[in-house]
Amino acid sequence: MMWSLWRCSSMTGSSAFTNVRVFKCFRQFVKNYNISARMPEAIAFQGVSDHSGLHKFSVNESETFWGALASQRLSWISPFNTVQNCNFSQGKIKWFEGGKLNVSVNCLDRHVHTCPERVALIWERDEPGTEVKFTYRELLELTCRLGNLLKRLGVRRGDCVTLYMPSCPLAVASMLACARIGAVHNVVFAGFSAEALADRIRDTQSSTVITVNQGVRGGKVIDLKRTVDQAVQNCPSVQQVLVAMRTENSVAMTDRDVPLEEEMMKEDVVCEPVTMDSEDVLFLLYTSGSTGKPKGLVHTQAGYLLYAAVTHRYVFSYQDGDVFGCMADIGWITGHSYGVYGPLCNGGTTVLFESTPVYPDPGRYWETVQRLGISQFYGAPTAIRLLLKYGDEWVQKYDRSCLKTLGSVGEPINREAWEWYHRVVGGGRCPVIDTWWQTETGGICIAPRPSDPDAEIIPGMAMRPFYGIKPALLDAKGEVLHAHDSTGALCISMAWPGMARTIHNDHQRFIETYFQPYPGYFFTGDGAYCSKEGYYQIVGRLDDVINVSGHRLGTAELEDVVVCTIKCVYVFVVLKKGVEVQEDVLAQQLREMVSRNIAKYASPDYIQVVGRLPKTRSGKIMRRVLRKVVERKTDDLGDLSTLDDSEATIILFP
Ligand code: PRX
């Protein structure tokens, strides 16, 4: 009720009064910002426009390349003095220093100035056919009201606000409202448990949390506010929880809780944007690492925004008028860069998908594509693999002629899924773009077609580095593998604007994780193969991080949870001597513990009790051996020379 209420008032509230005020505000922006810099449709530097020529230029003349793009594509309050100031050994990454801008102005105001009625967001709600559209003007109004509300509640420049919300316009407006007033946002995926949420709130010392009463997903109602209530019990920093009403069901409100829509509607639709430095923090986003504690990666204003916008436009060939359908939740980096910042910075129309690929049936994605006219569909291999099992009819029922590009992200896309995506979903007409990147990289780093629409695409390969990205493969000794047709640790040898700047509260860990393993390089944690032609294929993680349904999960994080009562490790459990326990009871207990302490999606599917684990002589568990055992590839265990006792592996086989 409340939800639709503010939605209606936001639509009808576009009175002449509001428009005049908003318009006056824009006139001011025209003066303050260089918004005359229109985006040219093609990148061409000094007459070079083919991919390899441009790529060479972008890495050889990196300063010219990024400097020109930054001045063209972003609206600055005052120009930057230097393009980059980076030193990998110190973990120092700085771009566009001296420049001043406001990210929300870049994502909203400048488009309101040129095309106020263009649709910015299509909120594809859980029930098919109930989508709600927001124009740039409406989204700016919403953002300004929220910005004013946050200010009234005492949120100041540099404060961190934690969001625990599903993908919805209020979540986007909350992110942009933070950007508008100079606050830092920290979106926590709304599937995470109270414990995981509390950890992240504590690490950021947030005084403000924004949530919704309930989420709705796959026809199920999820009590998100209740999870927040549990979490904040153990978070003394939290002074207020803003609660939006996604459903009509009331929730218990405490003194700390603020009814979001009600309070927001009291606020003005104009909120002066704060002048931010290029290197001020825009957001934190937590991701699993190879040790127990998740890392709060820090992204800053100008470099991140520029990189998200440029990759969005070129990797997907996004053009004005296209409808960009990123299926990822805003709680992940994909949702940040390609659900929110990239498309909005480009003045695009972006879809916020609230549902699941199989609700109400396995045709959901393609029915949505038809109804919303999606031109670029960006999804995860795990969903594609799931859908292909249901058969082609679910796809063919719907008209997909609006589709131009099919993107894939999060994990390797196997050949069968790639072919099906290409042949059935795209009708053999749309390029399948496998995009490799990470929370740390801010945006796509390797993708088949950054510019040339006729470039060859090889199934299952991310292939070509994006502009300004210079990958290198290194061997175990830290030597660069110069020859193509080799496999090694995937590193990147020069800085790019979208890369994370540090780990919140732990710069030393940032240096140790990314810059010390291979001095002079940024280490991605992934292994990759480079073909004879110089195309890259991602092999998988080299560290103790695993990929569950396209989401990164640290094995140490899981172990931290399960190890606290019973001595065991992830799916392989080693019982204490003399302990006897029924395996199904143990499995049930472990699953419940992981769901409660991390998230339901992290709950192990497979738990096996074993006598011992394969370890190196120095005592490190050889997870790659365990992986092979799980995959039943025991004839391909690789190099076992460091194993302390090869008998151990035999014990593992059932
Ligand atoms: O292992 C790689 C895998 O996902 C990791 C990054 O996870 P996260 O930070 O959660 O970001 C996911 C979305 C960008 C990488 O280190 N990964 C991501 N994309 C691909 C991939 N593995 C293979 N192919 C990809 N296209």
Image: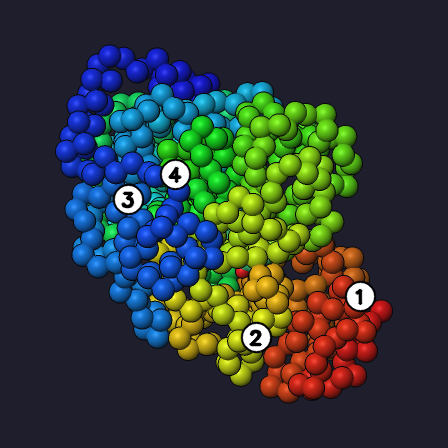
Label pair 1/4, CB-CB below 8 angstroms:
no
Q: CA distance from mark 3 to mark 2?
A: 37 Å
Where is residue 467 drawn, in percent x and y? 42, 55
Work out how far the residue at label 4 is from the one at label 3, CA to CA, in angstroms: 11 Å
Instruction: Determine crowd level at label 1: few under 14, some 14-19, many 20+ residues with C-alpha closer than 10 A.
Output: few
Mark 1 vs mark 2: which is more N-terminal? Answer: 2
Q: Residues within 10 Å of mark 3 (few under 14, many from 20)?
A: some
Q: Of the residues tagged 1 and 4, which is closer to the observer? A: 4
Which amino acid does the dot numbered 3 rest on?
Gln
Query: SS at mark 2?
Result: loop
Residue 127: give x, y in percent of width and height: 59, 24
Name the side, left or right, on which 33 lies relative to 4. left
Classify the position of ligand 1 by quadrant: top left, top right, bottom left or bottom right: bottom right
Report the residue at 30% width, 67% height from top: 86
Judge whether 3 appears above or below 194 on screen. Answer: above
For residue 344, above or below residue 474: above
* Left or right: where 381 falls relative to 264: right
Q: Disc 1 vs disc 2: Cβ atoms closer than 8 Å?
A: no
Q: Which mark is residue 483?
A: 2
Q: Disc 4 vs disc 3: which is toward the camera? A: 4
Quadrant assignment, res 548: bottom right
Label whose residue precedes the other's in the sequence (1 or 4): 4
Q: Alpha-carbon neighbours of circle 4 within 10 Å: few (<14), some, or many (≥20)?
A: few
| Amino acid on which the number 4 mark rests in the picture | Glu
Residue designated by label 4? 41
> What residue would you read off at disc 3?
72
